[in-house]
Image (tube, rainbow, N blue to C red):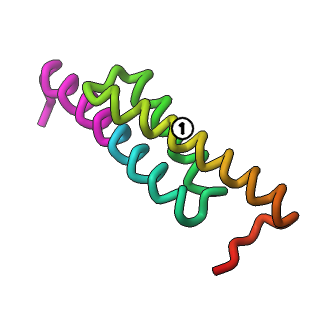
Amino acid sequence: MQLTSSARGNTGTRDADAMAVASFVLGLLGLLVMNIVLGPIAIVLAVLALWRRTARRGRAYLGLFLGVSDLVVLAVLTAIHQTVSWSF
């Protein structure tokens, strides 16, 4: 089955929208756990979503902000505790 050009365009937009939402969710989760992994993933997904011209630009920018915040939190915790590990 062949996709028409409009169907391909909708798929690309949906993929970019999904990337924007995933970036936001992963950036938010990264503030709580595994910020060393989830922060960079959130940043990459946000940049890709913005590059693909997502309709959810606000979520992509929030995901980008939260991903950067994850790395800032990691840097602060590392400076305070002199280790990358979390302790509960």
Q: Nearer the viewer, residue 7 or 76?
A: 76
Question: In the current view of this chain or complex, which residue is farthest to the bottom?
Answer: 88
Apparent side of residue 2 relative to residue 34 in the rendered image (left or right): left
Q: Quadrant of residue 82?
A: bottom right
Magenta: main secondary structure equals helix
Helix, strand or loop at disc 1?
Answer: helix
* Amino acid under disc 1: Val
Apparent side of residue 58 relative to residue 29 in the rendered image (left or right): left
Residue occupying image coordinates x 84% and y 55%: 79
Residue occupying image coordinates x 40% and y 45%: 24
For the N terminus, the quadrant is top left
Give the image location of residue 39, x and y in percent: 58, 49
Residue occupying image coordinates x 59% and y 44%: 69
Residue marked by disc 1: 44
Q: Quadrant of residue 55?
A: top left
Part of the protein shown in magenta = 1-18
Give the image location of residue 62, x and y in percent: 42, 36
Apparent side of residue 78 relative to residue 64 in the rendered image (left or right): right
Question: In the current view of this chain or complex, which residue is farthest to the front?
Answer: 80
